[in-house]
Amino acid sequence: MMKVCALPKLQEWEQFDNFALSLQRLGWSPTQKADGPDARSWAFSREGDSLWLVFDDMLGGSLRSEHSTVKLQCVADQLEASAAS
């Protein structure tokens, strides 16, 4: 089952790259990228865990994962703090 954690500060298409770069600074490596006309979805992995950074024009930004071990809220808090700076 997919877990989802909203990223309220990821509101604009142009912010996606900054959030992706912040994830990489936190040790997450991009493994897959899907960029479409109205959504972007990049997969990242770190130490056996994986998650998706997603931006959708209608839904905004979020982190998603099928792995129960990934603490999405913790990653989201770190990400929003580092992306805001």
Image: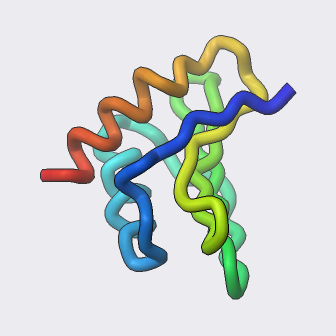
Q: Quadrant of residue 77?
A: top left
Residue 25 figure quarter: top left
In the picture as drawn, the residue positioned furthest to the bottom comes out as 37
Q: Residue furthest right?
A: 1
Residue 73 location, x and y as percent?
A: 47, 24
Q: Residue furthest left?
A: 85
Q: Can you say whether 29 is above or below 34 in the image? A: above
Specify the quadrant that holds the N terminus. Answer: top right
Q: 48 left or right of 75?
A: right
- Residue in the foreground of this view, choosing between 12 and 69: 12
Residue visible at 72% across and 81% down?
36
Looking at the image, which residue is at 73% across and 22% down?
67
Question: Would you place residue 58 above or below residue 63 in this image?
Answer: below
* 56 to the left or right of 27: right
Vertical placement of 45 versus 53: above or below? Answer: above
Q: Nearer the viewer, residue 53 or 33?
A: 53
x then y, percent, for residue 28? 46, 40
- Residue 59, image x, y percentages: 64, 60
Q: Number of labelled discs?
A: 0
* Residue at 64% in and 50% down: 43
What residue sits 72% from the left and 29% below the top? 3
Q: Is residue 57 above or below residue 43?
A: below
Coordinates of residue 5 in the picture (x, y in percent):
57, 35
